[in-house]
Amino acid sequence: MVKINKIYTRTGDDGTTGLTDGSRVSKHSLRPEAYGTVDELNSTLGLVYFYIEKSNHNEGIQKLIRDIQNDLFDLGADLSTPISEKKPKYPPLRIKENQITLLEKKIDEYNNNINPLNSFILPGGSEASAWLHLARTIARRAERIVSSLANNEMINNQSLIYLNRLSDLLFVLCRVMNENGKNDVLWIPGLNQK
């Protein structure tokens, strides 16, 4: 159970932050960088939620965005809890395979109605799509940071896989928000080189 009574604690004034297991690390170390970027992604998805019109077609996507936001809090908890050989007092919250499977099902479901691409697309087409592209790039950055963290410390590998699938899903949703790809803005290689 999370209980927050006090907003400032002064414990981070020395440039360190506390992890879930009680240990302290530098605020600029990979672990806080990873879960901080996941938090940034979650905040961006909060904006996405409000840019998606509340229609029958999009209510399912809005619910999906809220479910992903909840998963991202799970992911933040996972990343802020180092894997230890000592048995923890409480079982740590970790991303599980079924959360990844759900993303894969949603990718297949939404991508099924979209024509394949013959070109890369530029971020944009609609406001919702542009915000989803921003979220996608933040998810990719989070994935790179978590990958770097995994090279230095033990992590739950499902967290890395989750971010990979999430960025794929966000790309598909970008296209869904562009009338299933009809309003995608296609990249024209070398357009301004002439």
Image (cartoon, grey):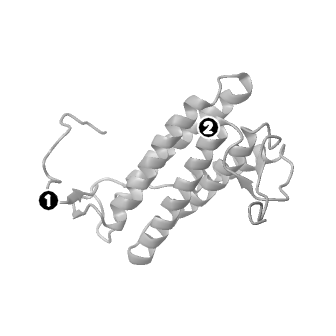
Question: Disc 2 on helix, strand or loop?
Answer: helix
Does any portion of residue 128 appear in the rendered image?
A: yes
The answer to which quarter of the image holds residue 60 is top right
Residues at marks 2 and 1, CA–CA distance in whole angstroms: 39 Å
Q: Residue at x 56, y 60 (%)?
A: 140
Does any portion of residue 96 appear in the rendered image?
A: no
Q: Which residue is drawn at 83% across and 55% down?
A: 117
Q: What residue did someone put label 2 on?
A: 64
Q: Nearer the viewer, mark 2 or mark 1?
A: 1
Q: Where 52 falls versus 33 (above or below)?
A: above
Question: Disc 1 on helix, strand or loop?
Answer: loop
Q: Is residue 56 left or right of residue 149?
A: right
Outermost residue toward the top?
A: 55
Outermost residue toward the front?
A: 194
Sequence-first disc among 2 and 1: 1
Residue 182 rendering spot, x and y as whole percentages: 83, 41
Query: Of the numbered discs in the image, which one, if any, rests on residue 14?
Result: 1
Residue flagged by tag 2: what amino acid is it?
Answer: Leu
Q: Is residue 190 left or right of residue 82?
A: right
Q: Where 31 falls versus 102 (above or below)?
A: below
Can you say which quadrant of the picture contains the C terminus?
bottom right
**Mark 1 burial class by Cα count in 10 Å: few <14, some 14-19, many 20+:** few
Q: Residue at x 48, y 59 (%)?
A: 142
